Image (cartoon, rainbow, N blue to C red):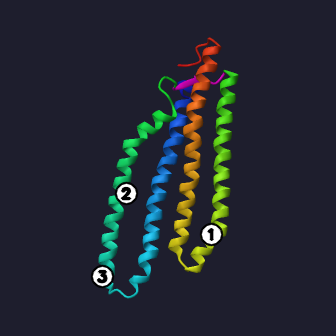
Amino acid sequence: MTDEASNGQFDIGGMFRTSATITFVVEILSIIVMVGSFLAWYIGGFLEIIAPEIQILLLLILSIITLIVFLAAFSVFLRFSRRLSNAVVGQGLEQVKMNAPRVKAVIFIYGLLVLTMFATGVYTWYLVDLWFLKPWAEFHTSISLRIFGFALGAFFISLLVQIIVALIGRTSTRLIVEVLDADDSDFVK
């Protein structure tokens, strides 16, 4: 058992930052998959009339472009992840002691809100997929368009969760600081 766990402390800053970072990574990866699958669908019809040697050359060129896009997305992630985490959690609040009942309530409500937003995003994507994306992919008989739909769903869901994490994370952080200051306790480390 770690020293933090034995003292009943919880890394609230890490929770908010990790939530924001995970959703940001999912968004970047889903955009890459969406672009790749849409391009695969678009050029898929042309591959049947192109010579096999040219098909291999096109696949190599597309692989290079995909890797460049991935590196660019990774660069964006590294550049903005610190700003994103600082926007979600202000400076000064890292760990709180969990034996403050109002702090437990704020953390529980935050988790419940993120879970509810996740469920809302999944159900909304399910409806969009059922009514629009799946029939579109079936009409074109394309696996690439199905993959595009799943990546679009992952992007949409992670964006909704990230909005909640960014808005509520900052508010929850301020609320916890105010609760702990009002108690005149040393719950903040």
* Residue 95, x across and y down, in percent: 54, 25
Query: Which residue is found at the position 62% from the left and 11% from the top?
Result: 184
Q: Quadrant of the N terminus?
A: top right
**How many C-alpha atoms fall within 10 Å of the one at disc 2: few (<14), some, or many (≥20)?**
some
On screen, residue 49 versus residue 187, left or right, reads left
Helix, strand or loop under label 2: helix
Residue where numbered disc 3 is placed: 54
**How many C-alpha atoms fall within 10 Å of the one at disc 1: few (<14), some, or many (≥20)?**
few
Label pair 3/1, CB-CB below 8 angstroms: no
Quadrant hosting residue 170:
top right
Quadrant hosting residue 137:
bottom right
Helix, strand or loop under label 1: helix
Query: Which residue is found at the position 46% from the left and 39% from the top?
Result: 84
* Residue 86, x across and y down, in percent: 46, 33
* Residue 16, x across and y down, in percent: 54, 36
Q: Using the image, tell me which numbered label, if any, was put on residue 70.
A: 2
Q: Using the image, tell me which numbered label, if any, was put on residue 132.
A: 1
Start-end of magenta stretch: 94-99
Helix, strand or loop under label 3: helix
Residue 8 in sight in this render = no
Instruction: Out of 138 and 67, give the one closest to the viewer.
Output: 138
Query: Which residue is found at the position 55% from the left and 35% from the top?
Result: 15
Label pair 3/2, CB-CB below 8 angstroms: no
On screen, residue 20 versus residue 112, left or right, reads left
Residue 169 in sight in this render = yes
Say which label, 3 or 2, has the lower sequence index.
3
The amino acid sitting under disc 3 is: Ile
